[in-house]
Image (spheres, rainbow, N blue to C red):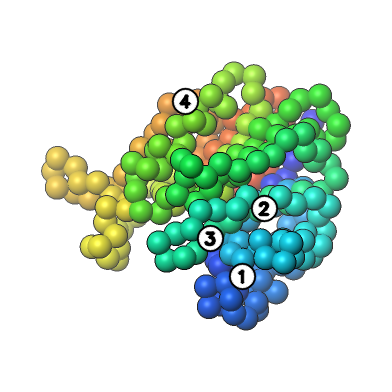
Amino acid sequence: MTVLRIVSYNTLFGGRDDDGLGDDARWRAAAPFLKSLDADLYALQECNFWELLGERRLHQARTELGMTSAYLAQANTTTAGHRFHTAMLANPRWKTIGQGAERNKYHHVLGWMNGRVDDADAVWSLRHLHLNPFSPAHRAGEVEPLQTLAAPGRLSLLLGDANMLGLSHAEPDWSPLPRHLHHTQLVRTDHGRLVANRPAANLLEDAGWLRSLSAAAFVRQFGQQLEVGGSRNVHGK
């Protein structure tokens, strides 16, 4: 049975202070830990400024993590001037047959990569998301095109930062959430209670995705074993 180990990690401004422009102590601490997870593929979010100087920081990360290929999906510019790129870095077991990025429909970016594992015939479809942190409705719109990837017989994986509570997670105590952020995550029930607003997760579950995590989210696969590292591991069989 094929086992593919994938780690998803939000670097928080590329692992640097000052919105990605400052000291890189956080990345220098994170890189050895990430490498110790011995992944076949890393999906990294918030790779700010990794596009500069011919994507120098991307390829430095590729070397530090022991990977042999890397792809940077360059993001839109936010209202504060940030560009939260995403990166996928792989070892030789992964053979890319196509890759790209879509920005028009996305608050940040959707990076995608199709490929094969260990030269097998089966083609995997990887989609790397960093969903809108402010709008549950927009998050649902961002995942709408991904319903077709849950079709029977397809090997598909959604990775990244979903910016929402996963379907399998119980309601937390929302009282610490400031009022000005309520509509980014919550909806009021008919009884006046504020609960998680999860239309994007509901849409993916209805389409047939297997499982959801809180940070890195959704798996659809058949006949192979998959390990996904994010807030925890998921094993689908």
Residue 38 is left or right of residue 73, and the answer is right
Labels 2 and 3 touching (C-beta < 8 A): no
Query: 205 or 113, which lies in front?
Result: 113
Number of other residues with Cα within 10 Å of mark 3, as a class: few under 14, some 14 to 19, many 20 or more: many
Residue 65 located left or right of residue 102: right
Name the secondary structure under disc 2.
Answer: strand
Report helix, strand or loop for mark 3: loop
Q: Looking at the image, is mark 4 or mark 1 earlier in the sequence?
A: 1
Snapshot quadrant of residue 31 = bottom right
- The residue wearing badge 2 is 72
Say left or right for 131 vs 220. Answer: left
Q: Residue furthest front?
A: 53
Which class describes the residues within 10 Å of circle 4: few (<14), some (14-19), or many (20+)?
some
Residue 39 in view (yes/no): no
Residue where numbered disc 1 is placed: 15
Residue assigned mark 4: 207
Above or below, 28 against 175 in this view is below
Give the residue type at disc 4.
Ala
- Which label sits in the foreground, 4 or 1? 1
Disc 3 and disc 4 in contact, CB within 8 angstroms:
no
Question: Can you say which quadrant of the picture contains the N terminus?
Answer: top right
Residue under the point 14% across and 40% down: 190
Element carrying mark 1: helix
Cα distance in 3D space between marks 1 and 3:
14 Å
Above or below 109: residue 59: below
- Which residue has dot 3 on it? 83
**What's the distance in space between the residues labelled 4 and 2, CA to CA?**
28 Å
Q: Which amino acid lies under the numbered mark 3 shown in the image of this protein?
A: Arg
What kind of residue is marked 2? Leu
